[in-house]
Image: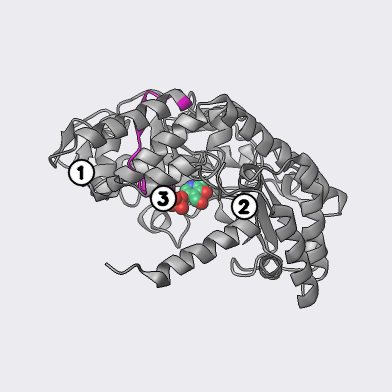
């Protein structure tokens, strides 16, 4: 068969973009060579509906072993007693959980998208806000930190069946113990979505949700540095408190319900090539090298936050505990949209982001979100952070000067020279 030049040339162009630019999108990372190899392996050819030892297809002996290794490594990594590695994405992990804990119309309580939450936590444009009945908690205007009093009073008023602790753009650690006390006081199930800080949590650098939350979901491709995908975990199995039954009318433990929520509830065949890549990433995350990596991600974020503050930028909550920060650009007279576009011209990739109490639309926004997982994988250290923020500042101060942006892009290329994508 003829090689598809059109697509392979585009893949090469994307590789060049990744190689030469500065990747500051907080949810992105670069996987290792062996994770990439598994993701592009012959396992993509295999159908394996069901779970290890209980498949609906023949010839699953090998993928059974692969999937079991992924499950066992994830259990060790997070100290979980139950893991499902099949969700194709973080959104699908959340879908599977909701579908087994809730009925359409039930109340959920999540982190407001415009304060740092995720679409799947009840946004009206997402299935979670259309199928369920959402209310929201947010951050305190003065501190930029989660307002636990407002969380509690909203929970008491709304009596949600499910509370979601998790965020896409929140730079502070979460108090899962406080979340659990509030959930218990209203009889709600507590789910943590640790998609962003999963790697930091796995290495004990941030608070551990497993002892406090009934269910924990995550993506595998952000700080965890695995392939694009999702996962569901529990510290301890439990009986569904709302007496929800399987489609056959049986009452089962939550582990059994969650498994059937993923397959056959929301997905068909699992992506065994991606599950193999997840297993490899979990193996990597269990090493001391990954501990050093996660600490470096955090140190780089601290150094970056300081460099922004030193140049007069307003970081929401005035700093970071994790791998990212949200910058309010209103005192710099530039929108998030204009900043994102100018930065891309200078080969620096960030995403525009709403800031709490934003007066601009999600398409324009007043802020940008930046994170350090990807540049840390490329080998950048604390000493490089001031230079990076210097370049970002230069872009923001000259965002309409095309020649200047191109010149900054050249400096970026110089900085990234000799830093491999794969380590
Ligand atoms: N949950 C949170 C907190 C996220 O930040 C994200 C992705 O950004 C997701 C869920 C969804 O993950 P995916 O893009 O894999 O569906």
Q: Nearer the viewer, residue 330 or 417?
A: 417
Q: Nearer the viewer, residue 329 or 29?
A: 29
Disc 2 to disc 1, C-alpha distance: 38 Å
As displayed, is residue 351 above or below residue 222?
Answer: below
Q: Is mark 3 within 8 Å of ligand 1?
A: yes
Left or right: residue 309 compared with residue 170:
right
Numbered circles on residues, count = 3
Q: Single out the mark in the foreground, 3 or 2.
A: 3
Q: Which residue is mark 2?
A: 115
- Mark 2 is surrounded, within 10 Å at the Cα level, by few (under 14), some (14 to 19) or many (20 or more) other residues, namely many
Q: Earlier in the sequence, mark 2 or mark 1?
A: 1
Q: Position of residue 345 (x, y in %)?
A: 68, 70
| Residue 357 visible, this orientation | no
Q: Earlier in the sequence, mark 3 or mark 1?
A: 1
SS assignment at label 1: loop
Name the residue at 19% across, 37% down: 60
Q: Position of residue 31 (x, y in %)?
A: 51, 45
Of the 4 image quadrants, the one containing the C terminus is top right
Q: Which residue is mark 1?
A: 49
Name the residue at 38% across, 52% down: 132
As displayed, is residue 176 above or below residue 29?
Answer: above
SS assignment at label 2: helix
Q: Is mark 2 within 8 Å of ligand 1?
A: no
SS assignment at label 3: helix
Is residue 155 in the magenta section?
no
Q: Nearer the viewer, residue 295 or 150?
A: 295
Q: Single out the mark in the foreground, 2 or 1.
A: 1
As displayed, is residue 117 above or below residue 396?
Answer: above
Residue 91 is tagged as 3
Disc 3 to disc 1, C-alpha distance: 20 Å
């Amino acid at each position: 068969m003829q090689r598809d030049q059109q697509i392979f040339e585009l893949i090469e162009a994307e590789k060049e973009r990744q190689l030469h630019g500065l990747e500051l999108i907080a949810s992105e990372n670069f996987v290792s060579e062996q994770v990439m190899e598994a993701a592009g392996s012959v396992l993509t050819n295999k159908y394996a509906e069901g779970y290890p030892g209980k498949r609906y297809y023949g010839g699953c002996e090998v993928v059974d072993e692969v999937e079991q290794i992924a499950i066992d490594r994830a259990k060790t990594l997070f100290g979980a007693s139950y893991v499902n590695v099949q969700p194709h994405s973080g959104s699908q992990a959340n879908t599977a959980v909701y579908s087994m804990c809730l009925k359409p119309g039930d109340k959920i309580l999540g982190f407001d998208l415009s304060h740092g939450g995720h679409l799947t936590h009840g946004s009206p444009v997402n299935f979670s806000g259309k199928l369920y009945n959402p209310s929201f908690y947010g951050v305190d205007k003065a501190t930029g930190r989660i307002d636990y009093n407002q969380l509690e009073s909203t929970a008491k008023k709304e009596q949600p069946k499910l509370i979601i602790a998790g965020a896409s753009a929140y730079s502070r650690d979460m108090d899962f113990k406080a979340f659990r006390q509030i959930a218990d006081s209203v009889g709600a199930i507590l789910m943590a979505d640790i998609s962003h800080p999963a790697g930091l949590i796995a290495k004990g650098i941030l608070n551990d949700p497993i002892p406090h939350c009934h269910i924990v979901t995550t993506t595998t491709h952000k700080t965890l540095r695995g392939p694009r995908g999702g996962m569901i975990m529990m510290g301890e199995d439990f009986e569904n408190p709302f007496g929800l039954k399987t489609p056959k009318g049986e009452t089962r433990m939550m582990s059994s319900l969650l498994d059937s929520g993923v397959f056959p509830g929301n997905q068909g065949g699992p992506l065994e090539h991606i599950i193999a890549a997840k297993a490899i990433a979990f193996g990597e995350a269990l090493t001391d090298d990954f501990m050093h990596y996660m600490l470096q991600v955090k140190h780089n974020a601290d150094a970056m936050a300081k460099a922004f503050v030193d140049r007069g930028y307003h970081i929401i909550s005035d700093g970071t505990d994790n791998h990212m920060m949200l910058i309010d650009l209103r005192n710099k007279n530039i929108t998030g949209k204009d900043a994102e576009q100018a930065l891309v011209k200078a080969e620096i990739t960030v995403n525009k982001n709403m800031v709490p109490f934003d007066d601009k639309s999600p398409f324009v926004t007043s802020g940008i979100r930046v994170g350090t997982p990807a540049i840390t994988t490329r080998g950048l250290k604390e000493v490089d952070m001031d230079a990076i923020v210097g370049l970002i500042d230069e872009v923001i101060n000259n965002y309409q000067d095309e020649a200047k942006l191109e010149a900054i892009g050249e400096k970026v290329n110089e900085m990234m020279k000799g830093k491999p994508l794969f380590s």
